[in-house]
Image (tube, rainbow, N blue to C red):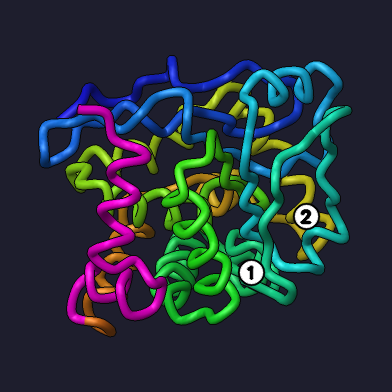
Amino acid sequence: MTAKHDTSRFLATDAIHNLRDYGGYRTASGGQVRRGWLYRSGHHAEASDSDLAQVERLALRHVIDLRGESERARHTCRRHDGFAGEVLFFEGETAGLAPHLEAAQGSIDAQSAHDAMVTLYAALPDRAGLNAILTRFFASLARGEGASLVHCAAGKDRTGIAVDLLHHALGVHPDDAMDDYLLTNASPRNEERIAHGMQLLGEKYGAHDEATARVLMGVDAAFLEAARASVTERYGSTDAYLAKVLGVDAAMRDALIAALVDA
């Protein structure tokens, strides 16, 4: 397993949250997930010109947008001049609202917010729209055409599940995959993001205390474990879910490993 909380993975940005490289982890075969090839983030709607220049340097072949059409309409991503990558998305809804906003609708304190997030994560594997774009996510990466970036709204919930599933398919240890997921809580300017989240939550649902906002705007191991457990309960194993629902059979897994894992 790798060292925890490797904040060197983050790329400097002004307004793109949580932009980071999620490669570099060791795999069960003894290889290492390729660095400089796999990126994750929040949306790019408020990206500065400097942020766009940073993204341009990544030379992205694919951008996989896990948000639904209403979210994309509200927060349309900016692209740098000359962007030539393929943007993949689902023509429908993948979560209605971003999960942390959906959870906020019934939250009155930190514990109920935590419980709501666990419930939402457990239900995400059953969301047809999310499964549809996750299928395209895996298929695009298996072609090995170049660097990719996967994102949702905040870059933590749907993106966290997508990255965890890819890490599993590549043979990354579950503890390392969990560490990558939790790294969101150490992202640069996280306190500023939480304060902004409190403001948005207040405007939409009324006042939320700081402890509740931190639960909704952050990640917790219990959230991802709920999704993992839900997949196992419904399909028998993560491997079965990947194969039966997302089309990641043995041949595609071999292709993913060939494209994304260095010996």
Residue 179 occupies quadrant: top left
- Mark 2 element type: helix
Q: Position of residue 128 (x, y in %)?
A: 54, 81
Residue visible at 35% across and 56% down?
Answer: 165
Q: Residues within 10 Å of mark 2 (few under 14, many from 20)?
A: some
The residue lying toward the viewer, choosing from 107 and 137, is 137
Q: Which amino acid does label 2 sit on?
A: Gly
48 on left or right of 182? right
Q: How crowded is mark 1: few (under 14 residues within 10 Å), some or many (20 or more)?
A: some
Residue 209's disc number: none
Residue 242 is covered by the magenta coloring: yes
User: Badge 2 is on which residue?
Assistant: 202
Residue visible at 35% across and 29% down?
Answer: 34
Q: How many marks on residues? A: 2
Q: Residue furthest bottom?
A: 234
Q: Considering only vertical position in the picture, is 140 above or below 185?
A: below
Residue visible at 78% across and 45% down?
Answer: 199
Q: What residue type is labelled 1?
A: Glu
Q: Residue furthest left?
A: 29
4 on left or right of 73? left
Residue 247 occupies quadrant: bottom left
Q: Position of residue 85 (x, y in %)?
A: 71, 40
User: Badge 1 is on which residue?
Assistant: 102
Residue visible at 30% across and 73% down?
Answer: 243
Residue 232 is covered by the magenta coloring: no
Q: Position of residue 69 (x, y in %)?
A: 78, 68
